[in-house]
Image: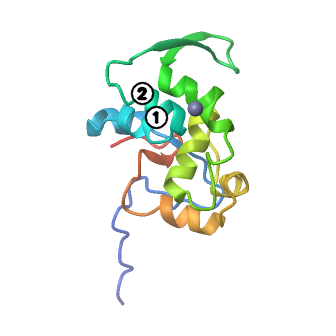
Amino acid sequence: MISPVPALKPSRFIKPTLDTPYHIDYEWWNKAGRDLRVYLKSHLCELHREMYADPSVDDQIDWVDARTADVKRIDGILYQLRVHCSRQPDYITEFTSVVDAVFRVFLVNDNQSLSPHQLGERIGKDPELILKTLSGKMVYKGLRPAGEGGN
Ligand SMILES: [Zn+2]
């Protein structure tokens, strides 16, 4: 009698599904030492990309959190993305990659977690494709299941 082969990672790995909530794990960015600001810039509209092309432009703007009503300072890039760039018709198009489109959704919704099902509705892509992209071995741009401890 052959005993069942144990799973490779029996610890706390739960296979994500179409209903698993995802978000941007900013810890991942911190730990990886990647430059979030450079990536943020790539989501700006043409006008603001030009404005922030000058590295000396480093502004912080007061932002009122819609859920808690707390005022917090956010990067000017994030601010412009929320109030301007995300409202341009080419913010998310059919040509935007899955990873970029998902990231753009979370930038604007204050990083409230969404499942591949919900993301599919927002970005107009197949939820299965989104799940496949996000649940692979690679973590793309810090996109991972919400509530999963970083490691
Ligand atoms: Zn803009």
Q: Is residue 44 visible?
A: no
Percent from the top left, x then y, of residue 131?
56, 62
In percent of the image, x 38 and y 41: which residue is there? 150
Q: Describe residue 93's horizontal placement relative to residue 13 as left or right.
A: right
The answer to whether the residue bearing label 2 lies less than 8 angstroms from the nearest atom of ligand 1 is: no
Percent from the top left, x then y, of residue 6?
36, 71
Circle 1: element type: helix
- Which quadrant of the figure has residue 9? bottom left
Whole-number angstrom distance, CA of label 1 to CA of label 2:
5 Å
Q: Which residue is mark 2?
A: 52
Q: Describe residue 37's horizontal placement relative to residue 62 as left or right.
A: left
Pointer 2 local density, CA inside 10 Å: few below 14, some 14–19, many at least 20: some
- Which quadrant of the figure has residue 82? top right
* Amino acid type of the residue that numbered disc 1 sits on in the rendered structure: Arg
Is 104 rendered above or below residue 48?
below
Q: Residue furthest right?
A: 121
Is 53 rendered above or below residue 60?
below
Residue 70 numbered tag: none
> Is 86 in front, or is 135?
86
**Label 2 near label 1: C-beta < 8 Å?**
yes
In percent of the image, x 63 and y 55: which residue is there? 93
Q: Which residue is mark 1?
A: 49
In percent of the image, x 66 and y 40: which residue is there? 88
